[in-house]
Amino acid sequence: MNSLKDEVKFLFSGQGMPYEKVCLMVAMVITVFMSVLLNGNIAKDAKVVIIDLDNSAYTRELTNRIEASEYMKVTAVVNTVMDPKELFYQDRAAAVVYFPRGLEKDRYTGVATNIGVFYDNTNTAQTSNIKEALNEIVGLDNAAAQGDIGSTNDSIRGQLNLASRNLFNPHDSKDNGETLGFLFFFGSMFFTFATIGMIPRLRLSHQLDSILLEGTPWDLVARILPYGGCLLVSWVLGLAVLRVWGDLSFSGSLLVFLFIQVFYILVTGTLSLFFGWTAANPGIASSRMILFIPGGFILGGMTGPVTFLAPWVVSLSHIFPLTWEYHFQRDIIARGAGMSDIAQTFGAFLIYMSIVAILFCIRFYTARKALIKERQQDAKKKEQLEKMAVEAVS
């Protein structure tokens, strides 16, 4: 009983992780907040790009049918030959439909022909509804060609077929999906555990005051570099294992990917320092990891398709650094994008990074101002005490 009483006393003392608050917060986030964010289980208006080389009344009619589907939204129609892979960069499309030249002529002369469709298979579940909808459109068109307008008879076979191809992860390999997602998630999580208690540790060792008075925010951010170097080495090692021992498809440049990671590590480390700043000790700071790491794993497209999420949820997910990491992972590792191909996403990430830096600087200089004010008050009190002591002696 004494041990139990002692542990209960420690639990509510504030000297360690405030588990009595954290457990309730986790339960509320999962049951209320996440249930609202993850209420979709179908692809809603997934982005589809159409390459229409026929540019006929018939292909425009097919485009309108695709647009009318609740599962798909036509975001662009291209009338020139181009590599479909380029249309997937920056998550601009979940599928690319290819209408070849002469499609209308073949349709009305009864010649067998194919519609090409390329699917983004970086997440194997995100195109399931799109595949079903496109098959239905082709089936109804074949039925109409045989005079059975509006038929849902699956036995009808016509001259129009879908020639589909799964890009980026054609064999549904887990090394290119969930395993890669867990590598970046757990790496980011333990990097945060290693750095989020840094400010409380410096405060307890009385080093923080001298940094605030004599240093700059960079003096604190520079302290995360050794941890960032370890994280970078661990990720390269993990990717090497998945590539040599597993079946990871690394389509892009490793140097481009490592260049991006430098910025990701800096912004994640800065957020770690920011969220851990006010914690009384490193133990309490560790519990705050849940505020900015898991959200990106849940909403970043690795645990579930982004096409299942509402547009406002996709936009909201970018407050989490791991969401950006998964954007770069899909583009560079899976799709083989170069630096110029991800320039728009990288530019947006730099804006995000600037906002994080500004918030951290505000917190640093606010703490410096408060410390200087406290020192002045202490000096004033000391001066008053000395004056009172002198008056008492005299």
Image (cartoon, rainbow, N blue to C red):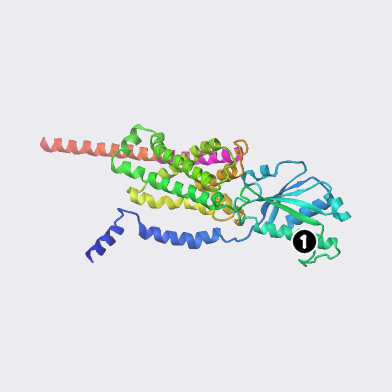
Residue located farthest toward the right when viewing the structure as drawn: 109
Rendering quarter of residue 351: top right
| Residue placed most toward the observer, 50 or 359 | 50
- Residue at the (25%, 36%) spot, across then down: 379
* Camera sees residue 336: yes
Q: Secondary structure at mark 1?
A: helix
Residue located farthest toward the top when viewing the structure as drawn: 214
Residue located farthest toward the front when viewing the structure as drawn: 245
The amino acid type of the residue labelled 1 equals Gly
User: Compared with residue 288, is residue 224 higher up or lower down, i.e. above or below?
Assistant: above
Q: From the top left corner, tell me how far across and down residue 56 is, in percent.
A: 84, 49
Rendering quarter of residue 212: top left
The magenta stretch is: 343-363
Classify residue 230 as left or right of residue 2.
right
Q: Which residue is mark 1?
A: 139
- Disc 1 crowd, CA 10 A, few/some/many (<14, 14-19, 20+): many
Rendering quarter of residue 81: top right
| Residue placed most toward the observer, 250 or 11 | 250
